[in-house]
Image (cartoon, coloured by chain):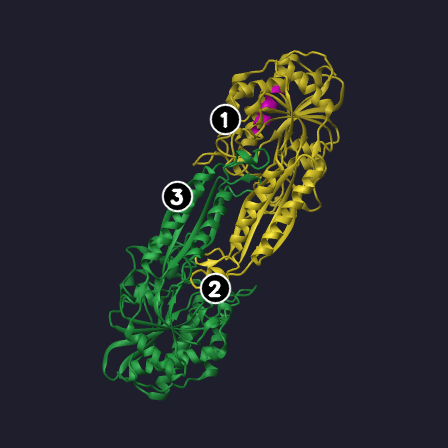
Chain colours: A green, B yellow
Amino acid sequence: MSTRTVELVEIDERRLLRRLDDLAQRGALPGGGLYRPLYSSAWASAMELVSAWLKEGELFVRRDAVGNVWGRVEGSRGGRAVVTGSHIDTVRGGGALDGALGVVAGIEAVASLWERYGRPTRILECVAICEEEGSRFNTNFWGSRAIADRLEPNEAERVRDPDGVTLADGMRAVGLDPSNLASAVRRDIDMFVELHIEQGPILEDHGPRLGVVTTIAGSAHLEIVVRGQADHAGAMAMTRRRDAMLGAATMALAIADVATKMGHPAVATIGTIALEPAQVNVVPGVARFTVDTRHSEPARRTELITQIGDACRTVARERGLDVEIRSLRDRPPVTLSPRVADVLRRACFAAGIPPRDMTSGAGHDAQVLSAAANVGMLFVPSIGGRSHCPEEATAAEDVVLGTRALATALHELAYQA
Amino acid sequence: MSTRTVELVEIDERRLLRRLDDLAQRGALPGGGLYRPLYSSAWASAMELVSAWLKEGELFVRRDAVGNVWGRVEGSRGGRAVVTGSHIDTVRGGGALDGALGVVAGIEAVASLWERYGRPTRILECVAICEEEGSRFNTNFWGSRAIADRLEPNEAERVRDPDGVTLADGMRAVGLDPSNLASAVRRDIDMFVELHIEQGPILEDHGPRLGVVTTIAGSAHLEIVVRGQADHAGAMAMTRRRDAMLGAATMALAIADVATKMGHPAVATIGTIALEPAQVNVVPGVARFTVDTRHSEPARRTELITQIGDACRTVARERGLDVEIRSLRDRPPVTLSPRVADVLRRACFAAGIPPRDMTSGAGHDAQVLSAAANVGMLFVPSIGGRSHCPEEATAAEDVVLGTRALATALHELAYQA
């Protein structure tokens, strides 16, 4: 890391915090928490707000083919762009900061730089990415994959939401043309910097208040189908059953045990389960559940997946059940740009914080965009390590600190290069 | 039991077996198994078939206010009626005999008696009861409770199916008038006799081929809600989680263990489970599951329910979770009529089979009708003890044997009394 020093950039703190509150109203659920699924009315309403803020900042505003919204300041030297941003969509019942912080802080950082420092040497952009969470359609990273030219053939026509609506129909519902997807590809991005909440407890428990991400853990999603025998809940003796639910329960505990024993940063989560026939008075004949498992080291990650499979097969054998294990999705770990990490570290030092180098257990647009650009990520603490829930929160001073550090890094990248 | 001997009644075996096959086509699912939910088109089609058979047998056919279909032969002496039958609806993915056997065998027995012996002294009826399983609307025993005057106030307007359709709207869809429910009540039934498959493995494992039910185990349905903390599946450390799914899994295993340790006829089944927010990449914050638990002895049954609650609370405490346990339904054990059981035993002896006295783990219309009549039940073996599944089956010779024993009992009750 170079010892070059930089000055911490000022931002409009009140505007930043007010906008985060405003965005949290778009898709707010009556019972608490947010839901802004891709191409929904809540999503469209959030994107309108983003567009209005970009116009207010006198940026050139553009919506691309998948609905990513871009705000741009031309650079005096042209060339490849420096970009910041994050995603606008949320999980069901999610919080106000996952994705939203990176969008609002990105707009704040770029607008502040433009207001205070005028035209940059490099093209400077911020982007609200349309989708990252996979919370509506059976796919994810739709926005960043469109930018990085990683969409699959006919994906828009093939992928559906639980109501059977295709991505293509979802696009049409918000005025987008699914025949035009290739125009979303950007081959002219040099740097992408994303500010995000940590979504875990490390910065809160051990400090400091800023983290620079060096690696994003690869997530593997498995579907596990347990087949036993459906029987009458009143008439079939306990000792004669081949109960798929009890098999799945035993497997779930064994899977969690495998990840816990391997230790940080190994994780494994059973997030969904469905039984068949799903009647109160019938012994379940089939149980299907998903496992989300992650590790930042490729070899350990492979070992984790292998141990999970072995544990399930052992349980199935002991209980006279059949088990099928299928990979739904397999994203390898991604190493981010050491050069951008250096810039981010200098910005943290400018804020008086020697940052922690971190692995992100969560997936991010940054990992997809790293195929197309030099990518860096900055973390601020999550209170209680909570995320993907209504209680997701970060102290206001940490939101401001992170946004100033982001603006400072963008200043070095776009004005001093 | 009296030592009076009776003669085994003849029936039309081929007609009986053909009709069982025909009825199994109504509501057959493409992937195997049946689904005839109350007031569906499959249900209506099955009821049409039943009506046609009753007319073919020259019985007086009538559909009552809830859609139970009755076939009647007047008795020379009038008085209170002797009735046989069972339910026409099925669980989702159920088999061809649960309920259907009692309906088809009941029609066969009454029609054979009418054909061979002419007018009985007592009124003799068979009934296809509209609903017993609770597989569409959030209620069950709808047909037998209407007969026994056990419907709840406004139940038809209040109870809905998963699509939000009320029972009253379901009735209107098949031409029934929900304002007319009281007319379904029967206060003139003396005896009700039901032939049913055992749905468990006892007759198959230990013999003989006929069982006389003395008690129906009471079922209690509980809903258990486990509350933990929703978190990011990638970022929240395994050791910091309050995972509602892992809590529910541990409880499910503990509940099964309680029933297994108490021994036959104690059972406990987790038939449904739902997680929130039910996303692959979110640690579940809430898990809701149902427990169906049964025992034929009231004191042991209470102990079983208490132990299940204690087990869940212990798991919740150990895992830092909250748990709520709610009773969805609580049906006490029912003792059937010793007098009708005697008649059924004589009929079994007439068939050359000294029957086994049995407890039914499964619930039946008979238990509801026992509030309004003297009730008896006859069991035939289930192959492999299987029921509520596509593989539900009984050997053809046992179907014939059971139907002849039923006809013989009805002969004694309606012709010799």
Secondary structure found at label 2:
loop
User: Where in the figure is residue A28, as x and y percent of width and height?
Assistant: 52, 67
User: Where in the figure is residue B366, as x and y percent of width and height?
Assistant: 67, 31
Marks 2 and 3 sit apart, C-alpha to C-alpha, by 29 Å
Task: List the residue tagged with mark 2.
Answer: A388
Judged by its main secondary structure, the magenta piece is helix
Q: Is residue B166 visible?
A: yes
User: Where in the figure is residue B175, as x and y percent of width and height?
Assistant: 60, 39
Q: Left or right: where does residue B3 sit relative to residue A83?
A: right
Amino acid bearing label 3: Glu
Q: Nearer the viewer, mark 2 or mark 1?
A: 2
Q: Left or right: where does residue B408 sit relative to residue A383?
A: right
Res. A179 image quadrant: bottom left
Badge 2 sits on which subunit? Answer: A
Q: Left or right: where does residue B388 sit relative to residue A164?
A: right
Which residue appears at 73% of the width and 29% of the height? B373
Near mark 3 (Cα within 10 A), the count class, few <14, some 14-19 or many ≥20, is some
Magenta range: B100-110
Badge 3 sits on which subunit? Answer: A
Task: List the residue tagged with mark 1.
Answer: B22
Up the image or down, A323 lies above or below A376; here it is above
Badge 1 sits on which subunit? Answer: B
Q: Nearer the viewer, mark 3 or mark 1?
A: 3
**Residue A55 vs residue B222, the one in the foreground:** B222
Amino acid bearing label 2: His
Up the image or down, B368 lies above or below B282; here it is above
